[in-house]
Structure formats: C-alpha cells, structure tokens
Amino acid sequence: MVAALIYLGKQWGQGIPDYAILRGMKVVILAGGFGTRLSEETVLKPKPMVEIGGRPILWHIMSHYSHYGFNEFVVALGYKGYAIKDYFIHYHQRQSNFSVSLKTGDVQYTSGSTPDWKVHLIETGKNSMTGGRLHRLQDILGDEPFMMTYGDGLCDVDLKALKTFHEGHGKMATVTAVSPAARFGDLMFDGDRVSAFKEKAQAGAGWINGGFFVLNPGVFDYLNGDATVFEKEPLERLVADQELMSFKHQGFWQCMDTLRDKNTLESIWESGDIPWKYSIEDHVDV
C-alpha cells in the first residue's frame, strides 16, 4: 500500500493538534475511477478534480463532511491519483499569501486560512473496483465504524442525522437513499431495512443508491479483492443478511456522471442558491 498523509491546518511542527480531538468517524472517499462518461474533463484529470465554482468537486464533498465535524478523510486513489496528491500537497500555498526570500528560500505566510483536515491519500490500484478499493483500506480504517461516499456527488444530507440513524439501528450498513430520475441502482424497502438492491435499473422511478454510507468494520467480510464491485455482491449479500438499512434523503442530491451533470452543478453554483455550500468554520457537533 502506498500512502501519503496531509494535514491542512498549520504546517507540520507548528502547533499540530492531538488528532484524538478530531470529531466523528473517518470518511472514505472513492476517488480512483476512470470517469469515462465525463471524458471531456477526465482525459486530463481524475473526476474528483473536475471543478465546480473554481474548486474540485472533491473539495466540495469534503467541506460538506467538515461542516458536520467529520475532518479526517481517507481518499482512495487510482486513475491519475497524482493530481489529487499534488492538489493537497500544495493546498496551503495556493490558499495563502506569502513572501519568499530568493536568497535563502525561506517562505513566510502572511495570511490565508486552511481547513483543519487530516487527509490520508492511499493508492488503491488503477484498475480496482469500488469494493476492491475499500478492501485495500481495511488496515487504515481499523475496527471502528466509518463513512464512505463517492468522489462525484453533492447533496445537502444531514450527516449528523445519518450518523445517529446508523448508530440507532444496530445493523452493519446504512445507505443514503435518494429519489431522482432512475439512472442508478433501485432500492426496495421493508420499513427502513433494504429488501432488494438492483444496480442500474433501466426503467422505473423510485429510491436509488445515493452514496453517503455509514459502515461497520464487519463489512470487510463481504469484500474479496480488487475485482469486487461494492454495489453488486457485497450490497446484495448485506440485503440477504438483513444488514443494510436506508436513510431516506428527500433534499438535494446530484451526481456528476456526465458533462451535462457537471454543467448543471456549475449553473447551480452560479445562481448563488447552493444547497451543498457550507461554511467549513461553522461545524455541527457530532
């Protein structure tokens, strides 16, 4: 496993906080896919680095989690993962004003703010599938519950309520269910328990997999190597074992699967009425 660790608060060695005080669960973001349906952008960069409002969609997703106090991220890299590493390695410099001594090479930062995030950047294989990427993260995630989402979707789901819901039902996994046009995996329910999961149904409307999962570490028992597609056998087995619950979200949700989706999100940003925009300084206790 190849990993990098980035802390986006103060620079290393300058008042680094005790990470025990970082609230909430670790957040896994799957960011390694090829993004072939958005090839107009992804020929040059990984899809999570495609910009909305001048910032990568990955940054928007992380800001959403940070608003609710989830500040430790495990980013599963694959296709063009170096671009994501480069973004975070140079994040502090890009967001700050600074003075450089050309004689000594010393840099003095004069202003600018960065979010108090801890970011693990983990290479999970160029060709790994979603379940395979998650499987490779088992060691870093340990034996605690964690959140997981994809690096290409924005929403205004209440992540504090999602966490509380998961902790209350005692099952292995929670999936956020959303109800846009039927383009993805259909979900059927028995109360809040998921009773059927069918990936990428071709017709019909209803609730679908919107990402934004909460998972217990026992979910790793449902994964088996790089070729595992999380949305297929693992979720289907969780359903069969009655271990998958749904958190129904009726608010805003939009993926960025195609150029049309990207333009939709950009138009929303330009309108100024941005459902997913939160102040990263205004955290909610979790």
Image (cartoon, rainbow, N blue to C red):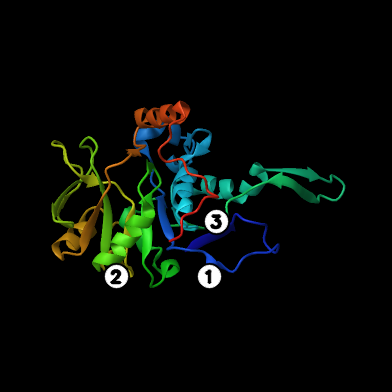
In the rendered image, the vertical position of residue 247 relative to residue 43, given as above or below: below
Residue density around tag 2, few if under 14, some if 14–19, many if 20 or more, within 10 Å: few
The reply to whether the C-beta atoms of the residues labelled 1 and 2 are less than 8 Å apart is no
State the mark number for residue 218.
2
Q: Residue furthest bottom?
A: 143
Q: CA distance from mark 1 to mark 2?
A: 23 Å
Q: Amino acid at mark 3?
A: Trp
Residue pointed to by mark 3: 117
Foreground mark, 3 or 2, reads: 3
Is 24 in front, or is 85?
Answer: 24
Is 14 in front, or is 231?
Answer: 14
Residue density around tag 3, few if under 14, some if 14–19, many if 20 or more, within 10 Å: many
Q: Amino acid at mark 2?
A: Gly
Residue 178 occupies which quadrant of the picture?
top left
Q: Is residue 171 visible from the viewing direction of this image?
A: no
Asked whether, in this view, residue 119 is left or right of residue 109, the answer is left
Residue depicted at x 16% and y 37%: 205
Foreground mark, 1 or 2, reads: 1
Residue depicted at x 38% and y 40%: 35
> Which tag, 1 or 2, sits closer to the chain's start?
1
Asked whether, in this view, residue 102 is left or right of residue 141, the answer is right
Instruction: Estimate the x, y position of residue 96 in percent, counting from the top left.
Output: 68, 44
Residue depicted at x 33% and y 39%: 252
Does dot 1 land on a helix, a strand or a loop? helix
Residue depicted at x 35% and y 63%: 135
Q: Amino acid at mark 1?
A: Ala
Residue pointed to by mark 1: 20
Instruction: Estimate the x, y position of residue 77 in percent, counting from the top left.
Output: 45, 52
Q: Residue furthest right?
A: 103
